[in-house]
Image (spheres, helix red, strand yellow):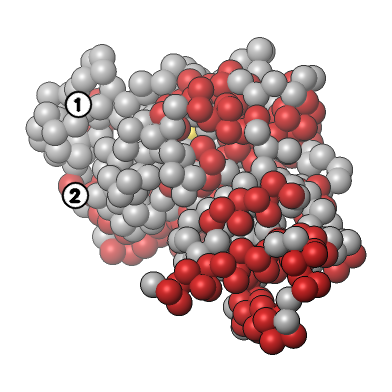
Amino acid sequence: MSFARWTTMTRLRRIELFALIAAALCGPRSLQAASPGVPALPTATADYVKYAITDLPTHFASGAVASLKNTPPTNPITNAGATLGRVLFYDERLSHSDGLSCSSCHKQENDFSDPATKSVGFEGGLTGRHSMGLSNGAYYANGKFFWNQRANTLEDQVLMPIQDPVEMGTNLTQLTAELSATTFYPTLFQNAFGTPEVTSDRISKSLAQFVRSMVTYQSKFDAAVAAGSPTTPNYAAAGYTQQEIDGAGLFHGAGRCNQCHVTAAQIGDAPRNIGLDADNSADIGVNPPGVGQFKTPSLRNAEVRDGYMHDGRFTSLEQVVEFYSTGIQNNPNLDARLKVGGQPLHLNLTATQKAALVAFLKTLTDQSFLSNELFSDPFVQLAGDFDNNGAVDGNDLAVWKTAFGSTNGADADGDGDSDGQDYLAWQRNFGLTWEDMATSVAAAAAVPEPSAAAILSMAGVALATFHRRRRA
């Protein structure tokens, strides 16, 4: 609508137009931005190097634990690289539908695993195996990933779910183009790699840096090691109960748990066949050799995973302990550590012993890791950023105009269509960028209002749509 036409309108028509605008813009709906949002990163780059390298306790920084580290010299952890990896890890742009991120199947509160038996992909399909916890992934000597170790390195692994037709279903060429079109990714790639180019190799490296920085070392057990040594923890000094001490004795003694979950970090050192089934044909595991062997995960934070084994068949630590007590099945490829006289090891633990072992396993939980902001979701909502590029500008108004009255494209308030309320989200945040989100998501009050011409243009679209609907 031109300004000249506005000035010649009758008073009644102006009132009608303003009434339409008021009805559209002044409803009680909350202002929320459309997915996938923008990263709200602090002005100072987070210090992943300090957390994951320089501040490591002695029993992680040297000795048996350190000998299992798989960080390649070509991709060391850097603060900018891991920061970029954090943003990528939580970004729903990495899925074909813009509706899933890595964190959808690897949740921080569950030790970056999924409590569901199988995870749900971008079109509702289920993953083939249970989502493994990611903590202490940097400590697995052969560097292979996935339950069947099909990824030779973490750098290989992080790109596979993104391209998997069930999980995230994205084409890497399309993904790099989409990320390049944002205002924030070129800046983050510049910080991490020296130039703003977005490439799949750089996506791989930064995601791997972020995952390798997920070291968990502030559990009750770590306090016992610090008060004693990796081989003789001082449980009393760490406040262990007698039940927990008894469980530690079982773990390192008759239970044989420490023979597969090695070192003072309880890390796996090789894939094992643990006798889950007498017949391994349902899932052959590591291939080769394809004999029912699966990667041995770290036991840190096992308490909060809620799903255990490669197929998630167990849902509690109590069930896991019961399996090792009485359920190990014989098969030709059963690991020698779980045999006695050629037969499966059956501990036949008493109820008291099983409870003690579970109590000890819970002392491996690092609550600070599970809520550490270094590993949390950095995304916030930037209402009015309809093209999801990290800036609220005139391009977003154009998107809103095109989508007005439709059910996609510019729905900032989540009510299912693009209407005047969504325009208000654009108006209030006009001029904001993703960098403004680092300090406050409510900074819109200080942002200049859009021009009168823009407002009148919006009104013209609203009125035209109203008359189309009335005629229909």
Front label number (2 vs 1): 1
Secondary structure beneath label 2: helix
Residue at 60% over, 38% down:
88
Number of residues whose C-alpha sits closer than 10 Å to that of mark 1, classed few (under 14), some (14–19) or many (20 or more): some
Q: CA–CA distance between discs 2 and 1?
A: 23 Å
Q: Quadrant of residue 77?
A: top right
Q: Is residue 98 above or below residue 461?
A: above
The percent coordinates of residue 160 (x first, y second) are 42, 27
Q: Nearer the viewer, residue 256 or 287?
A: 287
Image-quadrant location for residue 285: top left
Residue tagged 2:
326
Q: Is residue 265 left or right of residue 346?
A: right
Horizontal relation, residue 260 to residue 298: left or right? left
Q: Is residue 67 above or below residue 112?
A: above
- Residue 6 in the figure: left or right of residue 275: right
Q: Are marks 2 and 1 in contact (CB under 8 Å)?
A: no
User: What percent of the width, then of the height, locates residue 454?
Assistant: 76, 60
Taking the spot 47% from the left edge, 61% from the top edge, the residue there is: 406
Residue 284, numbered circle:
1
In the rendered structure, find residue 301 and report the number of the disc placed on it.
none
* Amino acid carrying mark 1 in the image: Ile
Quadrant for the C terminus in the image: bottom left
Q: Name the spot of residue 139 as percent of width and height, x first.
A: 55, 28
Q: Amino acid at mark 2?
A: Thr
Mark before the other along the chain sequence, 2 or 1: 1
Q: Nearer the viewer, residue 156 or 146?
A: 156
